[in-house]
Image (cartoon, helix red, strand yellow):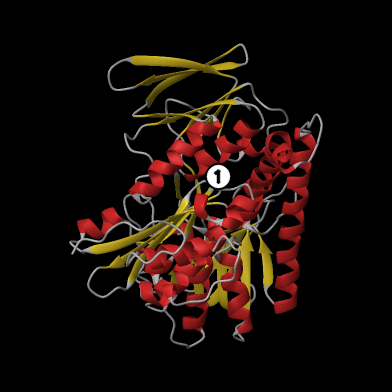
Amino acid sequence: MADKYDVIVIGAGPGGYVAAIRAAQMGLKTACVEKWIGKEGKVVFGGTCLNVGCIPSKALLEASHKFVEAKHDFDDMGIQAGDVQMDVKKMIARKDKIVKNLTGGIAGLFKANGVTGIEGTGKVTGSKQVEVTDQDGKATTFEADNIIIAAGSVPVEIPPTPLTDDIIVDSTGALEFTETPKRLGVIGAGVIGLELGSVWNRLGSEVTVLEAMDSFLPMVDGAIAKETQKLLKKQGLDIKLGARVTGSEVKDGEVIVKYSDGDNDQEMTFDKLIVCVGRKPYTQGVIAEGVGVETDERGFIQVDDQCRTSVPSVYAIGDCVRGPMLAHKASEEGVMVADIIAGHKAEMNYDAIPNVIYTFPEVAWVGMTEQDAKAKGIEVKTGSFPFAASGRAMANNATEGQAKIIADAETDRVLGMHIVGQHAGEMIAQGVIALEFGSSAEDLALTCYAHPTMSEAVHEAALAVEGHAIHMANRKKKK
């Protein structure tokens, strides 16, 4: 038996590494197990988010957006940029440098907080035991009073489009293209599909998105989803709804994709195809048989509201448990669990988790949509304000989109906030705070916002809930 710990965390993604650091800060002897092998052949921390997810995709999104701005929008501002070109290989190299800096930063944080990093594949073999197998196949058993499983998730593959070399790829492969494909297919019009499709569309690809569902972004408020779809189509994304992929064939460096649009069988030919149909929990092989930790039919580890599994000393957080697969959700669960293990009272408000799609403009939301409230029989009142009426948005050359607030018609309590526009991902924090503190729409309306800012759209939307917006004509409220 190797060293004994108060806490062992399996997985060093945004849930696991945060849980480990927090536990160590609480005075607990903590270790974190990670198996991810980076490009240099060494174990790196950060999980999917830092290595092949949130961070690298944002690096490409930002670079591609600046390229489009320089190529098409600078002239309106009086900036003569000439013939702007994109060096894709250099863009990818910059992305890799950012990833390396951040993953190395976690190793530094572990050292600063006294967290022991253990390299290898972790498996829970008992209520207080973790077996770690290193790259050479050597297994070592560690003992811990508490175990936190933060194993994350992996992309879902579908039988009609098996991954093939660098032609049919998942989201990870889409971050490694060294040149812009002329014809790019994307299966799935979810968050990842739209973001990656946007990157390569901006760089010159003819992008077609095939989505099996008949509705676009059904989890987003209806008005915001409709406007987002219109804006993305205007940018050149060809989004085909109700397109169910039935097969594919890789031939002569191309891929022929067959799909059904409900009425007829269709096919399209692409140079590259990205499969983005969702993610599934990575739990296979993480828990030995007989331990007693229960999973459901989809592989998710079953936990209560405080992430306790069916085994009292074992917790699970992040993508491998219920709830949205979001890095910040995993991190907050990690903090909650570490605090509970340390003997403190802690809980998480799952009704106040923000969501962001990092297209341009960004789409962000928190809380209920109008359709959610209607399904629950809640009568609501809403207020919206377009960025086209915002002075700062005009100055930024970013007048597309709107901010929308949904409030309870009886109590005026904010139930949801939804934004499509520049910096929506930053502004949505106002909605998160409003939900966390039980604010009313009037609270936001009475708040003094700096001028000129994009956030003033939130202020005006709150005023519009009662028909009091200043910088637009208000809809007449029903008496």
- Residue 417 placement (x, y as % from top left): 41, 62
Identify the residue at horizontal 39%, vertical 60% (top origin). Answer: 323
Residue 204 in view of the camera: yes
In the rendered structure, the answer to whether residue 444 lies left or right of residue 120 reads left
Q: Is residue 365 above or below residue 449?
A: above
What secondary structure is marked by label 1?
A: loop
Residue type, numbered disc 1: Thr
Q: Which residue is mark 1?
A: 359
Which of the 4 image quadrants contains residue 198? top right
Image quadrant occupied by the C terminus? bottom left
In the rendered structure, the answer to whether residue 108 lies left or right of residue 207 reads right
Identify the residue at horizontal 71%, vertical 55% (top origin). Answer: 43
Identify the residue at horizontal 48%, vertical 32% (top origin). Answer: 233
In the rendered structure, the answer to whether residue 14 lies left or right of residue 114 reads left
Q: Is residue 340 above or below residue 259?
A: below
Which of the 4 image quadrants contains residue 100? bottom right
In the rendered structure, the answer to whether residue 80 lies left or right of residue 152 reads right
